[in-house]
Amino acid sequence: MKVCPRCNLKYPNENDRCFVDGVTLEETPDERIGKVLKGRYLIEAPLGEGGMATVYRARNTLVDQPMAVKIMNPQLAGDANLRERFRREAKNAAALAHPNIIEIYDYGDTEEGTTFLVMELLEGSPLNALIARGPMAPAQVAAIGLQIAQGLARAHDFDVLHRDLKPENIFICRIDGDHPLVKLLDFGIARSMHDPRLTSQGEIFGTPQYMAPERITSIDAGAESDLYSLGIILFEMLTGRLPFQSDDLAGYFIKHLQEEPPKPSTLVPQCPRRLEELILKLLDKKPEARPVDAHQVIKELSALAPVVGRDSVVPPQPSSAGRQVAPTLLPTTLERWASRAAVFDQMLQRAFPGGAPPELQQVLGQIRGALARIHDLRSSGLTEQRKLEAMEANAREGRERLGNAVNILAVDLSNARQAARSAQGEVEPYFAADRQAEAAYRAAHAALEQHGGYRELAAPRADLVGALRDTVDGLDRWVLARGAAEKARSWVDAKTAEVKDLEFQLEALRSQLDRLEDAYEQERGTSEEILQRNGHSAQELEQGLVQLAMRFCQPLRPRRELGELFAQLESAPA
């Protein structure tokens, strides 16, 4: 694709000069710029590039809504696993519907077969840019950490693990006032805990500097591994450095597995004791020794917030709050071409007062016919876009409703898990006493057997009296200890049963969300097909307009009396 450096009008590669201002066309540095995806997403400019994808600023041409489009790198398009992970990023993030998780609007494949996803356009900086400025105040660490934990809690509540949580995947948005809004990004290698199909044996995904020990040794690491990564991030925000230092990736693996992290207070003396305890607990080598889930982390950070800066925490807003629906079709390529057609009509009247040549009148008629057809396509597309917006609003409302229900239940489940863990610790002495009493009885019984056991005696033996007495006393103590242990076990079993019951209820809500998403996908299919078809037709017509305009302007450009009108074309926005 080529572009006019003066008016930015896009041309096919076979064209050399702009019909508007006659300037020599230049090749665009990125062939994707100016392309339209799914009939409505216009790629405008690159925003950033990573190893897996490139992110572009884009616009929904039907409702003039700015957004971002993430397109998978073409050289990776042949990898079916990576393509599926990319699609899953869209599905996972879209279903989570939480203010601390980036909102995904749409996804699909380009004409070349490269996967892309459409998401909200964020203004701000990634967390690693803030960390690069130096250690953060505990207030800021707690405020940002709280929002990260909120996003993680929503993901984990729906059985989605991030698996690559790091500062580069956390975005600090600029919003009104002094309150930052934290967004978790890049669920591209996230997985559902119930969908291990995309992880092959021996594969390790993630970033070694932030990887939990169990992620290094097993592919079955759970939500606790994300909490470990959060602990690394909190440590780094607070101290300005990673807890483990190494010159190579293997060194990081070894240190995560074997080395204890330094206490944050040794680097930042003003670190609140409770914040330090939370960080060190998150960085425990044993997953079961970390907080039971992200909700417990939220509870800890919420308790810290009044001490270290609750004012730094932005209150979560519904994810739909920032979505605006355009009331009418806003200025698009159609309107710009309509303005050009009006100028073309003036050119004919000024250049040929007695009547324009039939061939020029015919070309202008073809331009107007194409514009009328584009208008019909755009109107039809806008109707389907409105239908999609209504579907999306219903789906979003359902997600948020289920998300709120899941959150309430998940908090109860978190408290139940914590209570079950605490109960297990409280009753362990009873189990230990039971084991000790049993061991004592069996030792006494073994001694009794050595003296002849319980066989009938032909004559009394004084040496058996003590052995019998020790055995009876041991049995008596075991009976008492076993009774206390059974009561303790019943108490723990009741706590465990409460956890299982809440997990069952939570799974039912997750299944309800899955059904909602499936119904939404089926419902939007028809509108998507119409938009795709109309968008392609409109693009072809717009490309034809460029050729028609060149045919129209070429014989008229030498006429001096039309200079003012050509200048008017040049000054109009492209």
Image (cartoon, rainbow, N blue to C red):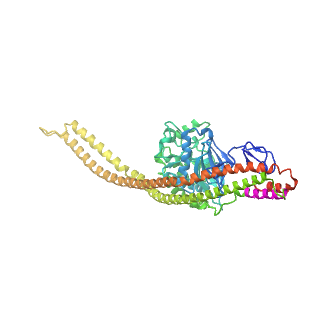
Which residue does the image show at 77% across and 59% down from the upper left?
Answer: 342
| Residue 99 x/y as whole percent | 57, 57
Left or right: 501 in relation to 160:
left
Which is more toward the observer, 356 or 59? 356
| Residue 480 x/y as whole percent | 28, 51
Which is more toward the observer, 56 or 160? 56
Q: Residue furthest bottom?
A: 327
Q: Residue furthest right?
A: 560
As drawn, 253 above or below 117: above
Magenta span includes 158: no
Left or right: 474 in relation to 212:
left
Which is more toward the observer, 53 or 361? 361
Magenta span includes 344: yes
Which residue does the image show at 26% across and 46% down from the upper left?
Answer: 474
| Residue 78 x/y as whole percent | 58, 38
Which is more toward the observer, 110 or 291? 110
Q: Main secondary structure of the magenta part?
A: helix
Query: How many callouts does the rendering have?
Result: 0
State the extent of the magenta-drawn residues as a range: 337-351
Residue 273 visible to the viewer: no
As drawn, 87 above or below 523: above
Q: Quadrant of the C terminus?
A: bottom right
Residue 436 visible to the viewer: yes
Q: Quadrant of the N terminus?
A: top right
Q: Residue furthest left?
A: 458
| Residue 459 x/y as whole percent | 12, 38
